[in-house]
Each structure stands twice: as structure tokens, then as C-alpha cells.
Image (tube, rainbow, N blue to C red):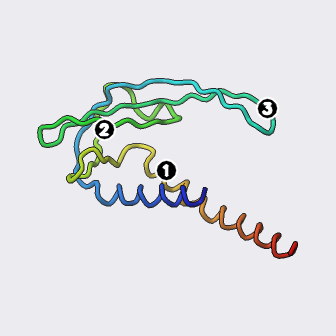
Amino acid sequence: IQVLILYFIITSIKRMIVCTEKVVAKVTSVIEEMKRHEDSKTGKTEYRYYYEVTFKYDYNGQEYDTTRTYSDRSKYSKGDNPTIKINPHNPKETSGLKGDISTLLGLSLSIPLFAFFDLIYISILSNVF
């Protein structure tokens, strides 16, 4: 799992570096979806809401769209016009949307936690053998 988190962090940082061109987007849809989640250990079931937000924007006379999923409804509403950053060499690649930085920060902070658990695991194994 650490490899996946590291991959996501690296691609997010890369996206933040290469996405330099600012464009005004339009939120064209916000779809609310409720997902059922069952905890495999406790058997407790809970329902979580997710919001799929679609953005449309123009760059060099061509229209593009991108979709992001959020767990917080207050991020965007239909009709909003956020300024986003795109990669001028690949306009489908975007950055600067709400949640990008906080997700990256959260994942970055999880690396030391995983390293700590790895050290405990190695310590237990070294004492067993």
C-alpha cells in the first residue's frame, strides 16, 4: 500500500508542477451518490455520500472536461466557475481543484505512520527469529 501512496504523491506533485496555465472552468454537473460500506471486522454498516463533479473548460478553442469525486458536498455547486490550472502541453491534465492539496498533504503525512508500523513489524520479526 505504501507503494501506491508514494505513486499518488509523486503524480500529484508532478501535476502541480506541470499545470501552469490558468483557465476558468464551469461546473456542469454534481451527482450525489450514496455508497454502502460494511466494516469486515465489526459487521457494522454505514452509508457514505460521494459527489461526482464534472468541470468543462476551453483551451485554445477546444473544449475539455474533467471529473472529480468528493466526499464533501460543499466543494462545488452546479454553475460555479472555478479557476483551475491545466498542463498547456496536455490540456486534459488539471490541478488546482479544491481538495488536491489536502489529499496530497494527508497522504504525505501517512508515510511516517506506515514507516513506524514497518519498524514495529521488523522488530517483532527479529525477536521471533
Q: Position of residue 33 (x, y in %)?
A: 52, 24
Residue marked by disc 1: 102
Q: Earlier in the sequence, mark 3 or mark 2?
A: 3
Tell me what residue is drawn at x 53 percent, y 35 percent. Answer: 71
> Which three-letter amino acid code belongs to the residue tagged 3?
Gly
Residue marked by disc 3: 43
Q: Position of residue 15 (x, y in %)?
A: 35, 55
Relative side of 50 to 112, left or right: left
Tell me what residue is drawn at x 29 percent, y 35 percent. Answer: 65
Q: Earlier in the sequence, mark 1 or mark 2?
A: 2
Q: Residues within 10 Å of mark 2 (few under 14, many from 20)?
A: some
> Which three-letter amino acid code belongs to the residue tagged 1?
Ser
Q: Earlier in the sequence, mark 1 or mark 3?
A: 3
Secondary structure beneath dot 2 equals: loop
Q: Is residue 37 above or below residue 120?
A: above
Q: Is residue 91 above or below residue 61?
A: below
Tell me what residue is drawn at x 61 percent, y 29 percent. Answer: 48
Relative side of 75 to 108, left or right: left
Figure quadrant of residue 126:
bottom right
